[in-house]
Amino acid sequence: MTARAWDIVLFGATGFTGALVAEYLAQHAPADLRIALAGRNRGKLEAVKRGLPDGGARFGLLLGDSGDPASLRAIAEQTRVLCTTVGPYAKYGLPVVEACARAGTHYCDLTGEPQFMRRAIDLADSMAQASGARIVHTCGFDSIPSDLGLLTLHEFVKAQGASGQFKRVTLAVTNMKGGFSGGTVASLLHGIEEATADRSVRRLMGDPYALSPDRAKEADLGRQRDLASVRYDDFLGTWTAPFVMASVNTRVVRRSNALLGYPYGREVDYREVTALRDGVKGLAFGAAMTAGMGALVASQVFGPTKKLVQRLLPSPGEGPDKAARDAGFFRFRIEAETIEGQRMHAKVVGTSDPGYGETAKMLGHAAMCLAQDEAKLPKRAGVLTPATAMGMALVERLRGAGMTFDAFPTAR
Ligand SMILES: NC(=O)c1ccc[n+]([C@@H]2O[C@H](COP(=O)([O-])OP(=O)(O)OC[C@H]3O[C@@H](n4cnc5c(N)ncnc54)[C@H](OP(=O)(O)O)[C@@H]3O)[C@@H](O)[C@H]2O)c1
């Protein structure tokens, strides 16, 4: 990479999540890392910078608009890493990916939109492989805990002398508390709108291998539908309900497996669910959550309720306040049966709001990992996943930042 003015540019720093990532970098980035904040409004950027802790005083400011390719090219060519929180990504993200793939600039984002990731893979994977750029989607709550949690478990199983291949793996959300921002709601609604209008988007979203590098090479394990109702799970030995991010995380984990050459096994059955607490209360919670998710989607498909429901949800720029973020957390248990028949599990824990406190931490460290850890990273370029682009180097960073990624044999 030729000499560049910046190590990291944070694009979208004026948004709710972008400002949290800027704050995280101001508090935790080493003083010699050259960081700039970018956005489309100088006044708003200056206000964000003024509100940052001391470390942010040295941050540069750059102007760019996702509708102006020349401005994106100029930003991408000035930095080694571009970290973006400009969303919905399906609306604004593709020109940013393209600018980075062409310029050989590493890229990380927070998308949870499979249709956008598929378009980015089709447009930019070979471009990024040629330029040496690592384009890394899903560097937040979706899908780092899933993607790096399973990688951690795989490494642990291999260290026990087994192959590291799995027969089945189920990620269970065992406890979680967190909120939503306006940008997340906007991305969800945009996805529903695209899927309602376009059959090919609906088909893609229903494909378990939607993000596969070579769809024809994937094993045929049936539709592998994500859980859509409350069910007893024999493998986990508990009642379960759907997990709202399963349809994104499972696709990302399957892409990681394929890009790595199927180290988790060619026929692994990978699922994500919410584990319910025992008793009537747990079941009632699961049923209410399932019904609530269905009602939100239905309200957006049928015209009259669409605007009414949208008025009740947070608007762009809004999100959970500091007290709510500090009170948030998540706990995942990833339970696996290896092809040798052993049971093993991993625990992944975050100690603040998953989508904002922990996400600012995860995206901040993904950007710093791409900028600082080159020698420790797998030699790989293209449109990647957290596990394939950064792997255990990012796990080590996140452990150091207070997250748990641990693996154990399961007692039976
Ligand atoms: N995966 C996760 O766990 C996770 C967690 C949190 C957020 N997210 C995702 O992150 C994204 C942002 O969420 P948010 O709540 O932070 O949204 P937000 O507050 O609405 O912020 C959106 C940002 O995008 C900028 N923007 C919009 N259009 C632009 C354009 N044409 N050119 C340049 N910048 C533009 C806005 O700039 P202005 O200030 O100038 O309007 C703002 O900085 C969403 O897609 C959300 O789903 C994911």
Image (cartoon, rainbow, N blue to C red):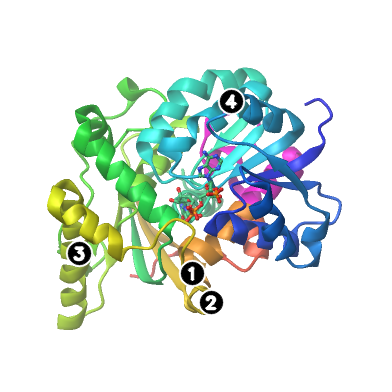
Disc 2 residue type (three-letter) = Asp
Is 391 inside the magenta-drawn segment? yes
Q: Residue 149: horizontal and vertical position, in percent?
A: 48, 55
| 10 Å crowding of disc 1: few (<14), some (14-19), many (20+) | many
Q: Which residue is mark 3?
A: 292
Q: Which residue is mark 4?
A: 69
Mark 3 vs 4, N-terminal side: 4
* Label 1: element kind: loop
Q: Which residues are magenta?
A: 365-394
Q: Residue, x 43% and y 44% (percent of image)?
A: 88
Disc 1 residue type (three-letter) = Asp
Q: Which residue is mark 1?
A: 353
Q: Is mark 1 within 8 Å of ligand 1?
A: no
Assess whether mark 2 and mark 1 are in contact (beta carbons under 8 angstroms): yes
Q: Which residue is mark 2?
A: 326
* Label 2: element kind: helix
User: Which residue is nearer to you in this view: 301 or 110?
Assistant: 301
User: Which residue is nearer to you in this view: 277 or 336?
Assistant: 277
Q: Nearer the viewer, mark 3 or mark 4?
A: 4
| 10 Å crowding of disc 4: few (<14), some (14-19), many (20+) | some
Q: Is residue 87 left or right of residue 219?
A: right
- The image's mark for residue 371 is none
